[in-house]
C-alpha cells in the first residue's frame, strides 16, 4: 500500500513560490523548497521528477488560480473596484526589488522555454477572460459604461497591471509596488466609469485598500 502524502501538492507549490521569490528560478534548489514545505529534496524529486517539473507545476497552478481569483470579483457589489483590490493585493506580494527581479526571471523563463510558453499563453488568456467577465458584471451593476467595457478594456487593464510592476521595478517611483499598481489601474479604468469621479480625492475615490 502506498504511503499517504502528509504534505499536499498545494502546500509544496506555496513553498516553491516563496523560495523562488527569495532565490530566483535559476538558483532555487529542491532543498530550499523542501525546507519550507517540510519535505526532503529526495521526496520532492520522487513527487515531481525534477526541479524544472516542479516549477512547471507552479506555473500551471498560477495559470488556473490567478484567473479564478480575479473572476471572483464578479460577485462583489462593485465588481471593478473589487478587481482592482485583487490586482493590488497581488502586487503587494512583491516586497522588494530583489523579489521583483526573481519574479521577472521566472517570467523570462516562461517566455523562453517551450513547455512554459504554452502555460504562459494560457495564463494571459485566462487573466484577460476573467477581467472581461468582471467588466461585464460591472456594466450590469451600473458601475461602468457597458459600451466601454469590452475586450480592449480588459487588455488595457492587464497591460496596465504588468506595466506598472515593470516601471516600479525599474526604479524612480515612490511607494510600494501595490501603490504604484493602484495608481495606474485607477488611471486606466477612470474612462470606463458610468459617472464622473467624485470630488475631494485624487480622481476616482477608488476601492478600499486591500484587506
Image (cartoon, grey):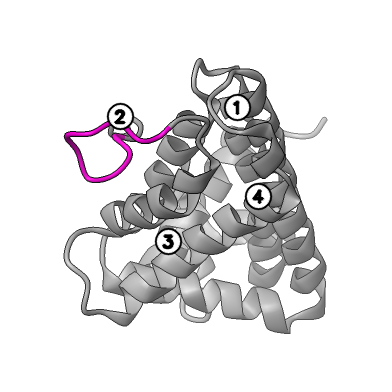
Residue on which the image places disc 2: 208
Residue, disc 1: 138
Q: Based on the picture, tell me whether residue 38 belongs to the magenta stretch.
A: no
Which is nearer the eye, 153 or 61? 153
Please tell me which residue is depicted at 67% across the width and 73% down the height of the picture: 110
Q: Tags 4 and 2 in contact by the CB under 8 Å rule?
A: no
Residue 159 x, y percent position in the rendering: 57, 63
- Name the mark nearer the viewer: 3 or 4: 4
- Can you give x and y, in whole percent of width and height, for residue 102 in the image? 43, 73
Range of magenta residues: 196-205
Which dot marks residue 154?
4
Q: Nearer the viewer, mark 2 or mark 3?
A: 2
| Label 2: element kind | loop
Residues at discs 2 and 3 in contact (Cβ within 8 Å): no
User: Going by the image, does 114 lie left or right of 9?
Assistant: right
- Residue 200 shown in magenta: yes
- Mark closer to the chain start, 3 or 1: 3
Residue 19, label in figure: 3
Q: Residue at x 82, y 30 (%)?
A: 1
Amino acid at each position: 500500500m502506498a504511503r499517504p502524502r502528509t504534505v499536499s501538492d498545494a502546500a509544496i507549490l506555496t513553498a516553491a513560490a516563496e523560495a523562488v521569490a527569495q532565490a530566483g528560478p535559476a538558483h532555487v534548489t529542491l532543498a530550499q523548497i523542501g525546507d519550507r514545505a517540510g519535505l526532503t529534496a529526495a521526496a520532492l524529486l520522487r513527487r515531481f521528477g525534477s526541479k524544472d517539473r516542479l516549477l512547471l507545476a507552479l506555473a500551471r497552478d498560477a495559470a488556473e488560480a490567478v484567473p479564478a481569483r480575479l473572476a471572483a470579483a464578479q460577485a462583489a457589489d462593485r465588481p471593478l473596484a473589487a478587481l482592482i483590490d485583487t490586482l493590488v493585493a497581488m502586487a503587494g506580494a512583491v516586497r522588494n526589488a530583489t523579489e521583483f527581479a526573481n519574479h521577472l526571471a521566472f517570467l523570462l523563463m516562461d517566455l523562453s522555454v517551450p513547455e512554459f510558453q504554452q502555460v504562459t499563453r494560457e495564463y494571459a488568456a485566462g487573466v484577460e477572460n476573467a477581467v472581461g467577465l468582471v467588466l461585464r458584471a460591472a456594466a450590469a451593476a451600473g458601475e461602468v459604461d457597458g459600451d466601454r467595457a469590452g475586450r480592449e478594456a480588459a487588455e488595457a487593464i492587464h497591460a496596465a497591471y504588468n506595466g506598472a510592476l515593470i516601471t516600479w521595478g525599474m526604479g524612480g517611483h515612490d511607494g510600494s509596488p501595490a501603490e504604484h499598481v493602484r495608481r495606474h489601474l485607477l488611471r486606466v479604468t477612470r474612462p470606463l466609469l458610468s459617472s464622473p469621479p467624485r470630488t475631494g480625492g485624487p480622481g476616482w475615490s477608488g476601492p478600499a485598500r486591500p484587506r
